[in-house]
Structure formats: structure tokens, C-alpha cells
Amino acid sequence: MEADHIKRHHQHHPNEHQCSSFVAKHIKAPVDIVWSLVRRFDQPQKYKPFVSRCTVEGDLKIGSVREVNVRSGLPATTSQERLELLDDEERILGIKIVGGDHRLKNYASVVTVHPETIDGKPGTLLIESFIVDVPQGNTQDDTCYFVKALINCNLKSLADVSERMALQHQIDPLNRN
């Protein structure tokens, strides 16, 4: 099943100066909870630990641009990112970095969120793929390793937040805001 999702939504075609890969994460929370966080292009700080602030130009439709402030600890302070794809029915989000003070040039990513069963309970398979230029002085392997480490950190945080929300919904099922 994972391979089918990757084949369908996560095919990037890197040139010799780019790298591309994907990360899959199984989250012990229902798909609607996970998607409610992922789809919020205007609020990545809800689960991305390196984002301190986000402001959006536009109306949260395709083409909207967000300005993300990055917490210290990363070799960046800002990133401008454009919403390329938002499909609530298929649960697909695509973004492209269009500016900022970092080394991720021509970065684009696609996130898909899929329902699955984990330990007999509703869960989520999230797949995030990316393509990015390899900065001068780096290798494709180094670049992919760095980007995958950032994605893994974000997805671990997403899993933690989603699983807490799922637990809260189990404790208080009428609290579905």
C-alpha cells in the first residue's frame, strides 16, 4: 500500500544537481486529526518545532505565500513558502520554498495522509517526499540526510501532537473542535 501511494503522489525527477527522497511515518491517531494539523498552511508551528512564527499573504488558496520565522539552532532565520497543492478530499499538501535565508534552493515537498489501522485502532500513514538542489560543497547523500532529519523531527512532533489530541478526544468525545 505504501508503495502505491509513493508511486501515485511522490514521484520527483531530480537532475544531477538535485536530490529527492521520502519519509513515511505511522501515527497512532485518526487521519482526520492528523490532516487537520497538516493542512493548516498558515499554522505550521502547531507541530513543526523549528517554526516560531508564520504569517500568510493571500487567502490560503493555491499560490498563497507564507513567511516562516525559524527558531535558532538551524542555519536559517526565515523561509518564504508557496502553497502549490491543497486537496482536502485526497488529503494532499504541496509546498515550494520560494525564498529565505537558507540553503534549501528549489525545494518542493508533497505530503499525503492516508488512513490505516494500527494495533486495531484508527491510525494514519503520512508520507512526505521532497526534491531540492544540492548546495555547492555538499553531496546528494549529505543533502538528503539533512532534509530527512528535519522532516523526521517535524513528523515525530506531528505524531506526538496528533496522538495527544486523539487521546483527548477519547477522554472527552464531545470536545471535537
Image (cartoon, rainbow, N blue to C red):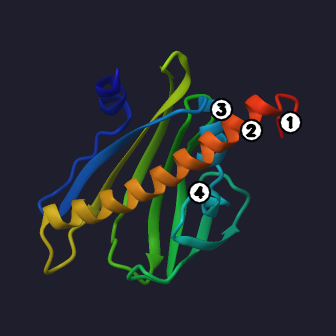
Q: Could you say whether the residue bearing mark 1 is in a helix, strand or loop?
A: loop
On screen, 150 above or below 101?
A: above
Mark before the other along the chain sequence, 1 or 4: 4
Which three-letter amino acid code belongs to the residue tagged 3?
Answer: Asp
Q: How many residues crowd mark 3 within 10 Å: few (<14), some (14–19), many (20+)?
A: some
Q: Earlier in the sequence, mark 1 or mark 2?
A: 2
Mark sitting earlier along the chain (2/4) = 4
Instruction: Quickly name the residue at label 1.
Output: 175
Q: CA distance from mark 3 to mark 1?
A: 14 Å
Q: Position of residue 11 (x, y in %)?
A: 29, 40
Q: CA distance from mark 1 to mark 4?
A: 20 Å
Q: In the displayed structure, does residue 4 sit left or right of residue 14?
A: right
Q: Secondary structure at mark 4?
A: loop
> What residue is pinned by disc 4?
47
Identify the residue position indicated by label 2 in the image: 168
Q: Quadrant of the N terminus?
A: top left
Quarter of the image holding residue 17? Answer: bottom left
